[in-house]
Amino acid sequence: MTQPFGELGRFAEPSLYILVSLSGGPKHGYAIMADVEEISGSPMGPGTLYGALARLERRGLVEALEPEERRRPYRLTGLGSSTLQARLESLGGFVRTGLARLGGDPT
Amino acid sequence: MSALVRLYPRAWRERYGAEFLELLADRPASARDRFDILHGALDAWIHPQVRATPAANGEPRPLRLTIAGPAVVGAILLIASGLATYAAPMGGFGYKETGALTTVLVGGLIAVAFAAVAMARITSAGSGAAAAILAGAFITLLPWPILIVGFLLHAIATVGFGVILFLSGRRLMGGALTVSALLLTSFNTEDERALLTIPIGLAWILVGLLAIRLKAPQPITQRTAPSRQSPRFAATDEFRSPSTGPISPRLHRLQGQARSSRRGRGARRVGPARSPAPRRAPGSSGHS
């Protein structure tokens, strides 16, 4: 389920941030950038944002809604939601293992 | 700012251009953003995510013509600039006055760089080297002495691209590009080395002519997951995982599972991602 992230190359991490941002509801480009900056603590460039969005859209993980003036909102698809869920669960296991080992638990 | 957006492929601009410009109007681009946009434009050429617009006759534009066209035009510009530079009179400071000729040379470098990018797309080889060729060509637009860095990057990346083509079985194209690009690294406007644009020009003409005979890649849309959003989107070789092979069946299965899952939940939808498309997006109205 997390396989699509492996093919996104340098866009894998931005794509994850975008999916997390859209999991809170549809957003257009500027709103995604602002939200991602709040989530990650660092800004995402416009070229990176649209490079990742194009990949996510082509893979059916996000979809575009009707434009509002010249802004086009995007939302998570069902596939995007399940892919994000699987990815976050995988990362959660990774984080738990790392923290446990740091704490001396050789799990 | 729109000049930066024009660096993207036309198909990309038609799909994302308006909203991208709106985003840049909302948030003026910093120097870092400009670099990011340049990087994004290069990526859009190397890894196109949006299918090219059909040609006037309704058929997809043959990709091989996107190699031959810029290759031959660029080659002519390179050869012309070399000959004219060689014949140019010496200026007042002991150097040749090559201002306008440099523009012709840079135009030629950019044109053949686009041919390299198209070549990388059709042969699925050397996309990194083609990106470096294009980056080098664009850097030559900057003032001296930075343009020298761009020129050398362009030439060295062309050597690498030629080697990759050679190793991938396109020996005539690869060999010609490798040897002529190696010569190009010795280019100098002040003496007979100005003529070193001629071998590289001839090599690109050869590439352009041979490219016309190239077979276009098999339509990839048949073996990849179609986009649910728009038929404009076509998958490319990027959809194939080198380690696991084609993943389109898996994507089809995942999409099927997602649809089944939604049907199974029926009208009881949970969470914003599964809710019907709102006409007005909450997050999209936050900034205006």
Image: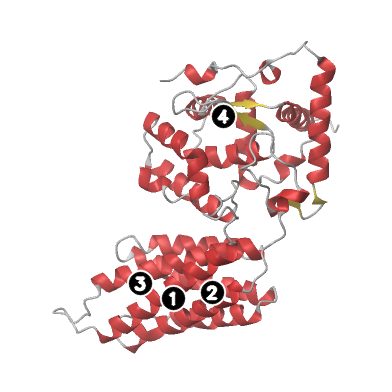
Can residue B32 be seen here? The reply is: yes
Q: Amino acid at mark 3?
A: Leu
Q: Which mark is residue B105?
A: 3
Report the residue marked by disc 2. Answer: B208
Left or right, A13 with respect to A104, comes to left
Q: Nearer the viewer, mark 1 or mark 4?
A: 1
**Mark 1, other Cα within 10 Å: few <14 / some 14–19 / many ≥20:** many
Report the residue marked by disc 4. Answer: A40
**Mark 4, other Cα within 10 Å: few <14 / some 14–19 / many ≥20:** few
Tell me whether marks 2 and 4 sit on the same chain: no
Kindly identify the residue that appears in the image at 79 percent across and 21 percent down: B262
Q: Mark 1 near mark 2, Cβ–Cβ under 8 Å?
A: yes
> Could you tell me how far apart the alpha carbons at marks 2 and 4 are, in whole angstroms?
46 Å
* Quarter of the rendering occupied by the N terminus of chain B: top left
Q: Mark 4 near mark 3, Cβ–Cβ under 8 Å?
A: no
Q: Position of residue B62 (x, y in %)?
A: 59, 62
Report the residue marked by disc 1. Answer: B75
Q: Secondary structure at mark 3?
A: helix
